[in-house]
Image (tube, rainbow, N blue to C red):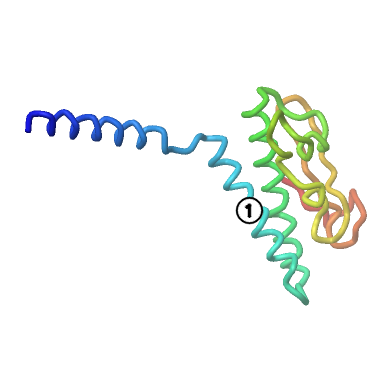
Amino acid sequence: MSNQPKEKKQVMKETRKNRRNAGFTLVEMLLVMMIIGTLAAVAVIQVGGMSQKAKIDATRVSISSIENAIQTFEIMTGSYPKAAEELTAPIGNNKGLLKPSALIDSFGTPFQIKFSGDSWEIRSAGPDKQMGNGDDITN
């Protein structure tokens, strides 16, 4: 009978220990948010007969996903990427933060990403597929 309280205490300790180890890290949460955003963008792109506004909205979501990937890259490596290709390359044992197709807007043109220290500009050519016009979409 006197062994039962000791066994119960041991079980409770193990349960508390397992609960402490069951949480998520900030990096895991950011990656999940980025994946959800990317999936949302892909879902919008796949809808047939999209209007121009829907394509613009999907491009804005893609820009947001790229921004999240840049911030996640900084958290994981301690520095910002110097080129967009670093976002698609593996980081240590992890896969790249983005697929190469995520660097193309909903109009079929590649995003232009300019890095400058700890800031960046992400630009889509927009509906006319020409950079530098009034319809460009930026972050």
Side of 20 where 49 appears, left or right? right
Query: Would you name the residue on which mark 1 appears?
Result: 37
**Residue shown at the point (65%, 41%) measured from the top left:** 68
Q: Is residue 44 above or below residue 96?
A: below
Q: Quadrant of the C terminus?
A: top right
Q: Quadrant of the N terminus?
A: top left
Residue 42, image x, y percentages: 71, 60
Residue positioned most to the left:
1
- The residue closer to the viewer here, 16 or 43, is 16
Give the percent coordinates (x, y) of residue 25: 50, 34
Occupied quadrant, residue 116: top right
**Which is more toward the observer, 70 or 114?**
70
Q: Is residue 77 above or below residue 62?
A: above
Residue neighbourhood size for the residue with mark 1, other residues' Cα within 10 Å, grouped as few (<14), some (14–19), many (≥20):
some
Front residue of this view, candidates 117 and 79: 79
| Kind of residue sitting beneath label 1 | Gly
Residue 115 screen position, x and y as percent:
79, 32
Q: Position of residue 110 (x, y in %)?
A: 87, 50
The residue shown at (76%, 73%) is 51
Q: How many marks?
A: 1
Check the image and name the residue furthest to the bottom: 49
Residue located 92% across and 54% down the image: 130
Residue at disc 1, secondary structure: helix
Write the residue at 13% across / 29% down. 3
- Residue, far right: 130
Q: Quadrant of residue 21?
A: top left
